[in-house]
Every structure is written in structure tokens, then in C-alpha cells.
Amino acid sequence: MAYLNRAVDPRRRTLAIGGVVAIHALLAVGLLRGLDVDLVPTLETPFGATNIPLDPPPPPPPQTEQPRERQETVITAPVTPIEPLVVDPVEVVVIDPVVDPRPFVVDPGPAIEPVVEPARQAFTPRRARPTNDSTRWITTDDYPARALRDEAEGIASYRLIVATTGRVSACEVVRSTGNGMLDDATCEFIQRRARFEAATDETGAKVVGSYTGTVKWDIPE
């Protein structure tokens, strides 16, 4: 009861009332500011730094290197004057040539005798000539049996090619008898039986020659 009846200092009471009013005023100001608060939270950094947004800032654009200008350096060399070269004159002395009174003789060397080829003996070219009896090359016994039965007759003209060996290498009927069996028999027997002396040229050498003739086919009586 002694506490309740204790007298209160008026100045302390005034200070207490002022403190309560100040607290209510601060609460009211805080309430009003709370209504304007931004919904995006920010981070406070210590020591009074500015707020940092949650999304990182975009990267700066890449910097392109500017081409450097080509600088040319011109170096000018000093021009040094060239002094003319002074050459002493040369004395030219003309000496009279000494002429040898002896005549100039050329050694002809060993004498070369001309080579004289022996004169070639000229030969008259010669045709191929038979060395056996040409009338025996074909006889009546050689008459083809069928041509004989058909009583075929005629004259065959032939041409022979005579090799350097004197043998007949080819035979050709240039005019036919009109009967193939008689023509074939003409070349067959002549080529088998004829012998020749080979033809020669202007030097006397043997060469391939030719020979022509005829055969008359008559039916024997």
C-alpha cells in the first residue's frame, strides 16, 4: 500500500506519456510505409552498399579489334658526292714488227695415194634359160583321161617364175585351152619337170626371172 500511495514526479510522468506517443507514431509510419513496399525482395549489403538484383546483368558486347594502320617508314640515305677518277695518261709505244726474210713453208705431211677401185666388169642381163628339153616337159602320156574321153583339145599359154636356184616357183596360165583339166595339167607337169639356168643382172648376179611358152594339147591317134 505504501507503493500505491507514493507520490509520482510530474516530469517523469510527462516523459513516459511522450514516449508512448512517439512509439505509436513510429508504428503508424511503419504501417503506412509497409503498404508501399515493393514485392521484389532486395538484398542489403553491409556497409551501406546498393541493392544487387537477383538476375545477373547481360554480358557486355564483344569488342572487335580495329585494324592497325600500316605505317611506312621512308629512310633517305645521304647523298655522297662522287669525285671523278683521275687517270694518268698511258704512253703507247709502237714497235716495228720484225719480218722474217725466210719463206713460210707448210709441211704437206705424208703423201696419200688415192684409192682406185677396180672397174666393175659390165654384164648384159640375161633371161632364164631351160637346161633340159622343153618338148619333154609334157607328153601324150600326160593327157588327162577325162579330157581324153571328152575329146577336149586346145593350146595353153603359160608364164613361169624361175627362182635363183633354177627351179620353177610359180606357174600361171595366161591363155586357157577352154578346158580346166588341160590347164591344170599344163602347170602341174611343167612345174614338176622344167629346169632352168637362173637369170642374171648387169653385175652377173643371179636374180629371179621369168619364162613364157605354149603347150598344144592334141588327142593322140
Image (tube, grey):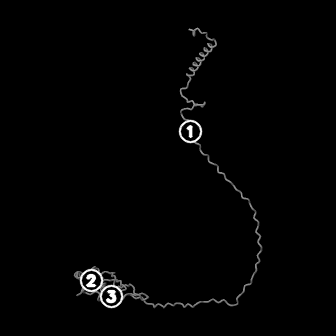
Give the residue displayed 57% in from the left and 42% down from the top. 62
Of tags 2 and 1, the one toward the viewer is: 1
Counting from the top left corner in percent of width and height, residue 169 is at 34, 83
**Residue wearing tag 2:** 153
Q: Is residue 98 left or right of residue 41?
A: right
Between 179 and 136, the one lying in front of the other is 136
Q: Where is residue 161 in the image (x, y as percent from the top left)?
A: 35, 83
Depth check: give the residue in front, 48 or 148: 48
Q: Is mark 2 on a helix, strand or loop?
A: loop
Residue at image mark 1: 59
**Vertical comparison of 31 with 221: above or below:** above
Closer to the camera, 202 or 7?
7
Residue kind at label 2, given as amino acid type:
Glu
State the image quarter where residue 31 is shown.
Answer: top right
Q: Nearer the viewer, residue 130 or 62?
A: 62
Residue 213, labelled with which disc?
none
Residue at figure coordinates x 74%, y 83% from the top left: 95
Task: Label 3: state its secondary structure.
Answer: loop
- The amino acid type, in three-letter code, at marker 3 is Arg
Q: How far apart are marks 3 and 2 (CA)?
A: 26 Å
Coordinates of residue 57 in the picture (x, y in percent): 56, 35
Mark whose residue sits in front, 3 or 2: 3
Q: Circle 3 sits on which residue?
A: 195
Pointer 2 or 1: first along the chain: 1
